Image (tube, rainbow, N blue to C red):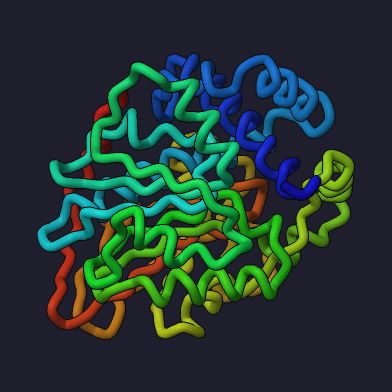
Amino acid sequence: MSRQREAVARTAVLVAAIRAKESERDDRLFDDPFADRLAGDAGREMLERLIASVGDQSTTQIVVRTRFWDEALLRATRAAGAPRQVAILAAGLDSRAYRLPWPAGTTVFEVDQPAVVVAKTELLAGEQPRCERAIIGVDLADDWSGVVQSAGLDPGAPTAWLIEGLLQYLDEDAVRTLFARVDALSAPGSVLLYDVVGKTLLEAPFMAVLRQSMAEQGSPWLFGTDAPGELAEDLGWSSHVTDIAEPGNRWGRWHAPAVPPDVRAARRGCLVGRPGRGCLDRLLPAQHRPVLALGPGHDLLPIGRYGDEHRLRAGSGTPYPVR
């Protein structure tokens, strides 16, 4: 494993520590009973250093992102005719297979570097996932398409994809290649969720401390775009962008007002998801659309690909039960 890939993998313990800290709050947005175990001393120490250098605000976006993706995945898999296979790319120490109330028949494919998936499996030994769980140890920089199919993913059936907290660590060519591989495996009815750092945000002077910190630990942030939906639109998917500040403020966890959607280069996080090919209801009700965040102004993107033979209907607005 290269030094950079190893460093990126280490950020998983930091994210787990942030989720563990959120789970201790009385007003928590989610409950992850496995996060503290997964974070370990290394994750807790990384979180302490992060807060000391850039403050608590940097952790809020990951908290909001986690809740939004939780709800997006559950709604995507609960609708009639919806995907029953979920693929989480760069899954890290994500524990959704264990903590979310998945519909019967759901299989969650967790794809990450071999050392990461082995470590997580060992840490959660004895725990029972709440779905079928397929762990796939492969470097996403390689051609992983055949590996996930060998593990049981059916490219002829719709898939709910989640790419969380990864794209900023890749260069643009690698990002484009990753999306092309997802696209090739996505049947009509598939849903794609991903977060990406806005280019204007990435290059903002106030981000210099965070960028330097990430570079020093061997995991520099390389990619950002102020047109996040185009990553999928260029492959024939459809998208809709919503400022992350809208749900963040509604939950009392955000730090700034929403920016009008026509301000292209704003320092903001966004939600993207639009009915595809003129045949669908919205996947999520407006008040519960998924949101993204890796840092202030990350773009949150639920993207849908739908064929005429598939029709997904919005679920209820009731939040999922925390565990």
Is residue 242 shown to the viewer in this render? no
Q: Position of residue 196 (x, y in %)?
A: 60, 60
* Vertical side of 110 occupied by 101: above or below: above
In front of the other: 251 or 36: 36
Q: Position of residue 278 (x, y in %)?
A: 24, 84
Q: Is residue 254 left or right of residue 210?
A: left
Residue 189 vs 89, above or below: the answer is: below
Numbered marks: total: 0
Q: Position of residue 203 (x, y in %)?
A: 82, 61
Residue pictured at 50% horizontal, 59% vertical = 194
Q: Quadrant of the C terminus?
A: top left
Residue 58 vs residue 195, the one in the foreground: 195
Which is more toward the observer, 120 or 20? 120
- The answer to whether any part of residue 180 appears in the image is yes
In the figure, residue 56 lies in which quadrant?
Answer: top right
* Foreground pick, 128 / 201: 128
Question: On the image, which quarter does residue 193 sit in?
Answer: bottom left
Q: Quadrant of residue 132?
A: top left
Q: Is residue 214 left or right of residue 229?
A: right
Q: Position of residue 97 (x, y in %)?
A: 34, 36
Image height check: is 69 above or below 231? above
Name the residue at 18% across, 65% down. Answer: 312
Q: At 70% across and 21% down in the image, what residue appears?
A: 42
In the image as oriented, which residue stretches furthest toward the front?
150
The residue at 10%/59% (across/down) is 80
